[in-house]
Structures are given as C-alpha cells and as structure tokens.
Amino acid sequence: MVQTSQKGRLHHPTRCEPAYCGGRVQQQYSTHNCCPFTNRFQHSRMTLLAAVVLLCLSGWVALYVILCNINGSRGYEWNCRLVTLLHGVLVVCITAYIGYVDGPWPFTYPGTKNTPLQISAMVLSLSYFIFDMVWCMYFRTEGPVMLAHHTVSILGIVVTLWLGESGVESCAVLFGSEITNPLLQARWFLRRTGRYETALGEAVDLAFVLLFVFMRVFVGGAMLYCELISPRPRFFIKCGGVAMYALSWVFMVDIWRFAKRKYGSKMAQWREQGARSLKNGAVVGDDAHEGKLD
C-alpha cells in the first residue's frame, strides 16, 4: 500500500507503521507494537532484564551485609529497614520525576509503552521486593497481607516488563505506595530509640495516616478509574490494579483500627482530665465562697 506524505511525495510504509495496523494511526505514546518480527528479540530482552535485576539484587544484598557489619549491635531488622528506607527515597524521587517531568502523565496515557527510565525504576524496585520478601519469609516478621502485597508487586512489575507497556501506571503505583514508606520507617526507628512518645512521634503518626489515606484511597482510586476506563491497558494489568487497590483498603482497615485505638484513648484521657479540672475548679470555688461568708 502506498501513501502520500504531507509534502506530496509517495511514501511506502514499513511493517512497523500504522498502515500495517489495520489503517489506524497510532496516537502519541502508543504501546501496541505491530511489527511481527519484534517478538524475536523478546526472549533476549527479558534475559538482559533478568540479568540487570540479579545485579541490582546483589547490590541490595551487599548493602545489607555492609550495614550489618557496620551496625552489628543494632540487629538485623534495623539494617533491613535502612535498606527499605533508602529504596523508598530513591523510588519516590525517580517515579516523581517520571510522572511530573519525563512523562507521560499516568492519568491520561495509561497502557503506554515503557520508557528507559520507567524500566530502570521498575527493575530497581523489583530487585528490592525480591530481597525484602525473602528476608521477611526467612525471619518471619510480616503477616500474609504484606507478603501478598510483595507478591502482587513482583508479579505486576514482571508482567509490565514482559509486555513492554503500562510502565507509567506501575511507576505511579510505586510512587503512591512508597511515598509513605519513609514515615513508616521513621515511626519504627523512633520506637526503637525511645522517642516515639514525643511530639515528633505524634507528628509522624498523623502525617503517615493522612498521607496514606490521601495517596492510597483518593489518588489511588482516581488512578484505578482511569486505568479501568482506558481501552489501552491489557485486561490482566487492570486486574493487577484492582488487586493493589484492594490491598490498600486492607491496609486502610488496619490503619483505621490503629488510629481509632490511639486517638480514641487520647480523647478519653483528655475528657477525663477536663472533667477532673472542672471538678477541682468547682471545689476551689466553693471553698473560696465559704471562706468569704465566714
């Protein structure tokens, strides 16, 4: 088939161009590659990505071993949480740059082709999640909900890397999931150092709860809605988004119970103290009045 270019010259499209895609002109950030021979390189591409993931995994393990040698007196969990904190900060910075600067905007272009920066962020997180899941299973520090979260995250990133698309949504989910991570780790470190029952501990708890609700429930719900109504993402990618959002609500229930228990007891203490202050003030007032009468 011969097409005419904008300048009037005859143009013979190649197999990779929209003429061989049923005549549909692909939009900007299109994902569906129509070249039949590109699948020949799929295996080698995934092999290369697997090698990079193993390399990054070795880096996380090496960092953990170094921290254990330096902070041996702190314990294994202390050093693992330092690795977790570093991963959270790195991923939040990278995915924020992807979403706000590099593009595309995840709410507008879900299901688009992965960019090199998106692939780098996903490889970095995939290697960390593998490290952390193995660590949690070995030391048995986490329950089934967190292990399910790690499993869904690992499978989602693997599928996204395999398909070569929907990386922008995966990075958006990583940003929303990890942005509360530094606060969560700070809360744990404050507990271990005996500084949790302070104004700083209260501020960290309040910031964590508010940020979690805003990012996971409201922003995450908007992201899931855009994912579901868009025709571009694959069906199982949408199923993965639903699973992640459902896990967010499971975490939300736990956080609600924690907030209700903590702030409910504080409100009861404040009411009791207020009632006691009013009672003491009434007694003092009565005594003063009786003294004047005498």
Image: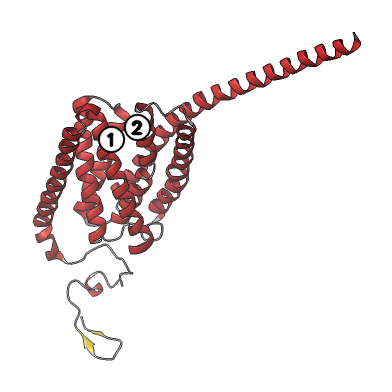
Q: Is residue 66 left or right of residue 223?
A: left
Residue denoted by label 1: 81
Q: Amino acid at mark 2?
A: Phe
Q: Is residue 140 left or right of residue 185?
A: left
Residue lying at 28% horizontally and 44% vertically, measured from the top left: 86
Q: Nearer the viewer, residue 43 or 71?
A: 71
Of all residues, the one furthest to the right in this rendering is: 293
Q: Position of residue 157 (x, y in %)?
A: 24, 47
Residue lying at 45% horizontally and 32% vertically, measured from the top left: 201
Mark 2: few/some/many CA within 10 Å (<14, 14-19, 20+): some
Residue lying at 9% horizontally and 52% vertically, measured from the top left: 47
Numbered disc in front, either 1 or 2: 2
Q: Position of residue 258 (x, y in %)?
A: 46, 27
The N terminus lies in quadrant: bottom left
Q: Position of residue 60 (x, y in %)?
A: 18, 42
Residue denoted by label 2: 189
**In what element is the residue under mark 2?**
helix
Q: Are marks 1 and 2 in contact (CB under 8 Å)?
A: yes
Of all residues, the one furthest to the bottom in this rendering is: 8
Position above or below: 273 against 89: above
